[in-house]
Image (spheres, helix red, strand yellow):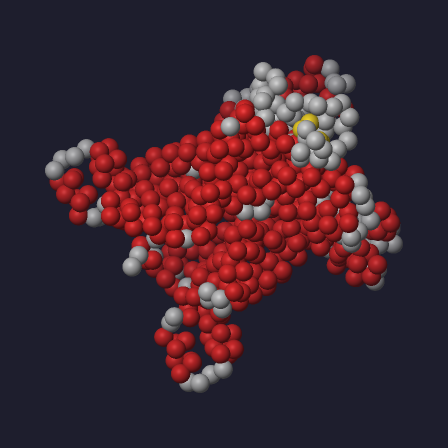
């Protein structure tokens, strides 16, 4: 196993896009950790972007406000603290929904029969509403806010994992080591957690990594629509929402407001790109078909 | 084959039933008084006496037990009585019928560039495997896939509207909007570009098209990245097949081998994904219509959600879900017809 792990690491490090992905992730992690040092919070809630001027018109980058000002708020502050928001949303939603999917998929796959039939039909039902729409609607009913967005994304985000783990378990169930464990009288719970999951978990982890990016996009899209983070919250989507309002109102001179899109937009694209690159690299590294 | 289709058809009502339960469950999370606003024009609501209010609650059964409420709600919904839309300031049904053609137009027109450009890029990448073009296209795929549609849309808006002034936001210019609302303009299909041609108003057609280019580009962007990846890997797999080697050994031109022998077979997985993609294009209109300030089902849904217009939200959810469920069913059945491995599996 250790030799195997080493070989995988070496393969990862030789892949330039993987290295780029990991470097970006490390960079964003550092920014998130040191956010209070880069931009000292000025109110009791550090996630609220401090208002620096009561003039609502966007102002281009200047000394003290390197990314400019929009809606009276410092964009630099919003981008830096928005990194924390992105991590918070991406990791919380992915971990929780993956866990839910894992439990449901394991039960369906391992016990089969009616359990399987019922759980899979429930999965089908949840899959019958387009994800972005389900998130929008659920958030509207729960009441707006970032936490509500996360709950909605979790409620409608577990089905992919459940299907994947179920299919893997259906395969693993017939393997010799599982049959042997069962014959020895090992309990169902232990068979699943000790024997089956460790052997089927990798595809799930890779899938989860690849989902983080698109989850962050969806959450930001909801903020962009005005359903997510409250006004002034450090969130990339919310910053871009300000930008949209100014762009639509400013025919011919929108280039004046480039910074309102460029900085939060770049942060977001790089963040999502990082996760997608890492996900791709992990998939390539673990894909048995590529093993020499 | 038949069992597969029958099974899928039997599951359809079950899924629709489950869907109706989810939607109904969401409605019930609100109290009866807040629900009233979903059924009655709020302007009227304020003027009603408590007795009249009770009557409306009776009519929609807001005080009944859960089971009966569900059945009544289902009956109303099936009859097309979807309540009053705050956002549309008209019954939800009419609001949807007014907006639907705009969204259908946008989503359907997007299919053409998505499929042709996506597949074309994928084939180019596969044929030039590990050469410069392949790397270039693949980098485009990864970066494109990481680009949120609303960020890309904002950039498109800035470049093509603000700087170049080519493609304005909205559905139509003011004058064109007046033309299509005038009595001489006959609405044959409700889809403006087609109606404009049928009416012989080429200027309106061009105007509608100018407003469509930017949103179509934004909708397509994401799916190019996706489709080209699938086409590329499928092409690479097919290119290793024996019959390709045979075709080359016969001395066929490389162009013929690629276009006639390889690409056709590589299209099978693309077709399955393509079907699902068309459905997702509809969902994508929510964001795109908001970015470009277009009237349509997508912006209707998003606005309804921000203004807590529950009747409209519910109706849109049902609408988008029906497209998804029925679309998936059609794709699955078609796929089973095309590929025998599916129905046996």
Q: Quadrant of the N terminus of chain B?
A: bottom left
Image label count: 0
A93 with respect to B318 (left or right): left
- Residue A130 on image: x %, y %: 54, 42
Q: Quadrant of residue B301?
A: top right
Decide: is B4 above or below A255: below
Q: Identify which residue is drawn at 65% across, 22% down.
A: A50
Q: For the view shown, which residue lies furthest in the left direction?
A: A184
Decide: is B269 above or below A259: below
- Residue A212 on image: x %, y %: 47, 40
- Residue B163 on image: x %, y %: 77, 49
Decide: is A125 above or below B277: above
A255 with respect to B120 (left or right): right
Q: Is residue B108 visible?
A: no
Q: Identify which residue is drawn at 42% across, 68% down.
A: B238
Q: Is residue A42 visible?
A: yes
Q: Identify which residue is drawn at 28% across, 40% down.
A: A197
A242 with respect to B281 (left or right): right
Q: For the view shown, which residue lies furthest in the front direction?
A: A63
Q: Nearer the viewer, residue B128 or B309?
A: B128
Q: For the view shown, which residue lies furthest in the bottom direction?
A: B251
Q: Identify which residue is drawn at 42% across, 32% down.
A: A96
A213 with respect to B249 (left or right): right
Q: Quadrant of the C terminus of chain B?
A: bottom left
- Residue A167 on image: x %, y %: 33, 47
């Amino acid at each position: 196993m250790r030799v195997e792990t080493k070989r995988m690491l070496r393969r990862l490090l030789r892949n330039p896009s993987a290295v780029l992905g990991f470097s970006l992730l490390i960079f964003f992690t550092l920014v998130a950790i040191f956010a209070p040092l880069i931009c000292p919070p000025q109110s009791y809630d550090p996630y609220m972007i401090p208002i620096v001027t009561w003039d609502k018109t966007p102002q281009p980058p200047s000394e003290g406000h390197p990314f400019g000002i929009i809606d009276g708020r410092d964009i630099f502050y919003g981008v830096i603290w928005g990194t924390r928001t992105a991590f918070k949303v991406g990791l919380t939603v992915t971990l929780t929904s993956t866990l839910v999917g894992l439990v449901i998929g394991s039960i369906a796959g391992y016990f089969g029969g009616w359990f399987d039939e019922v759980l899979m039909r429930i999965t089908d039902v949840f899959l019958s509403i387009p994800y972005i729409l389900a998130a929008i609607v659920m958030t509207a009913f729960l009441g707006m806010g970032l936490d509500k967005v996360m709950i909605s994304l979790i409620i409608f985000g577990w089905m992919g994992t459940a299907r994947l783990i179920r299919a893997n378990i259906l395969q693993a169930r017939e393997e010799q080591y599982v049959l042997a464990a069962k014959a020895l009288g090992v309990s169902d719970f232990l068979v699943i957690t000790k024997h089956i999951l460790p052997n089927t978990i990798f595809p799930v982890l890779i899938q989860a990594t690849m989902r983080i990016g698109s989850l962050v996009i969806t959450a930001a899209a909801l903020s962009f629509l005005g359903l997510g983070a409250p006004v002034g919250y450090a969130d990339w989507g919310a910053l871009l929402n300000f930008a949209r309002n100014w762009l639509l109102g400013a025919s011919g001179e929108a280039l004046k407001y480039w910074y309102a899109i460029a900085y939060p937009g770049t942060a977001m694209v790089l963040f999502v790109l990082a996760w997608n690159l890492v996900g791709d690299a992990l998939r390539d590294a673990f894909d048995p078909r590529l093993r020499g | 084959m038949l069992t597969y289709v029958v099974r899928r058809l039997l599951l359809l009502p079950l899924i629709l039933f489950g869907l109706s339960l989810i939607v109904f469950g969401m409605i019930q999370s609100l109290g009866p008084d807040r629900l009233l606003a979903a059924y009655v024009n709020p302007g009227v609501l304020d003027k009603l006496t408590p007795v009249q209010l009770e009557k409306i609650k009776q009519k929609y059964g807001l005080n009944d037990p859960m089971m009966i409420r569900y059945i009544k709600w289902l009956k109303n919904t099936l009859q097309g009585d979807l309540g009053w839309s705050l956002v549309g300031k008209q019954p939800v049904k009419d609001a949807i019928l007014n907006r639907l053609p705009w969204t259908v137009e946008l989503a359907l027109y997007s299919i053409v560039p998505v499929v042709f450009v996506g597949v074309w890029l994928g084939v180019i990448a596969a044929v030039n495997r590990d050469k410069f073009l392949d790397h270039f296209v693949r980098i485009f795929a990864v970066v494109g896939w990481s680009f949120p549609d609303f960020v890309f849309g904002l950039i498109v808006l800035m470049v093509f509207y603000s700087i170049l002034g080519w493609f304005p936001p909205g559905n139509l210019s003011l004058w064109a909007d007046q033309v299509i609302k005038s009595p001489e303009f006959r609405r044959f299909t409700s889809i403006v570009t087609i109606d404009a041609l049928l009416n012989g108003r080429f200027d309106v057609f061009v105007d509608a098209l100018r407003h469509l280019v930017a949103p179509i580009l934004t909708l397509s962007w994401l799916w190019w990245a996706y489709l080209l990846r699938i086409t590329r890997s499928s092409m690479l797999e097919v290119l290793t097949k024996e019959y390709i080697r045979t075709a080359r050994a016969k001395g066929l031109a490389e162009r013929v081998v690629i276009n006639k022998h390889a690409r056709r077979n590589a299209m099978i997985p693309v077709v399955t994904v393509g079907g699902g993609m068309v459905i997702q294009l509809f969902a994508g209109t929510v964001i795109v219509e908001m970015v470009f300030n277009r009237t349509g089902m997508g912006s209707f849904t998003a606005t309804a959600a921000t203004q807590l217009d529950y009747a409209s939200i519910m109706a849109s959810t049902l609408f988008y879900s029906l497209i998804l469920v029925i679309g998936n069913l059609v794709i699955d059945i078609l796929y089973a017809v095309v590929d025998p491995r599916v129905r046996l599996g």
